[in-house]
Image (cartoon, rainbow, N blue to C red):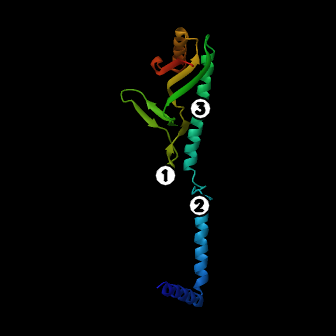
Amino acid sequence: MAQGKQNEVLGTINHMKKKGSLKLFIAVLLVGALLLLIGMLGLFDGKDEGDSKNDGEEEKYSEFYEYKELMEDEIRSVCESVSGVESARAVVFFDGVGESRYAQNFQIGSNEKIEYVIIGSGSSSHALYLGEALPKISGIGVVCRTGGSVSAKNELCALLAATYGIPMTRIYVTEAG
């Protein structure tokens, strides 16, 4: 039975040779194998270079993390400037990543009204974009050495609350181990 199948395959190949389609079949087979090899090696990641939608989001998050790191360094520096505080490390928590800001007109009176400033006309009209707002700090955690001084911890909480405009209940200071 295997001999019959082998003869059938050989007969099909001979028929393809006569028709000239064997070269086409081999070419398609080679292209398929090449595509499989490229896929396995990961030479193409599937990202369209012309697609900048994700680039804007990546840039937004990159700027956010830079801002977060800057704020943490600033808070660490403020903490270490307090008498009795050493080796501070700060973690900052935010409400969101930031929001797009647009120019607005405010009408104050009996009918308070807020309208976006629109520029352009017809189909090209759009709100005037001002940029991204910095995210608001929602909490701060500090790990530092105070020598166990409760007054130094309270002073840090009061200083951070006043400096960054957040309630003292959203600030936690603990002793480093």
Please give the label number shown on residue 123: 1
Picture mark count? 3
Dot 1, how many residues are within 10 Å of its Cα: few (below 14), some (14-19), or many (20+)? Answer: few
Q: Position of residue 77 (x, y in %)?
A: 63, 20
Q: Do the residues under discs 3 and 2 have CB atoms within 8 angstroms?
A: no
Q: Quadrant of residue 59?
A: top right
Q: Residue at x 51, y 86 (%)?
A: 3
Q: Earlier in the sequence, mark 2 or mark 1?
A: 2
Of circles 1 and 3, the one toward us is 3
Amino acid residing under circle 1: Ser
Q: Which of marks 3 and 1 precedes in the sequence?
A: 3
Earlier residue among tags 3 and 2: 2
Whether tag 2 and tag 1 are in contact, CB under 8 A, the answer is no
Secondary element type, mark 2: helix
Q: Position of residue 105 (x, y in %)?
A: 47, 33
Mark 3 or 2: in front is 2
Classify mark 3: residues with Cα within 10 Å, few (<14), some (14-19) or many (20+). Answer: some
**Inter-mark Cα distance, 3 to 2:** 39 Å
- Circle 1: element type: helix
Q: Amino acid at mark 3?
A: Tyr
Q: Which image quarter is the C terminus in?
A: top right
Is 130 or 75 nearer to us in this picture? Answer: 75
Above-or-below relation of 103 to 14: above
Comparing 147 with 31, the one in front is: 147
Tag 2 residue: 40
Q: CA distance from mark 2 to mark 1?
A: 46 Å
Tell me residue 89's x, y (percent): 59, 23
Name which residue lies at 60% across and 17% down. 79
Residue at the spot of label 3: 67
Q: Nearer the viewer, mark 2 or mark 1?
A: 2
Query: Of the residues shown, which amino acid type is indicated by label 2?
Result: Met
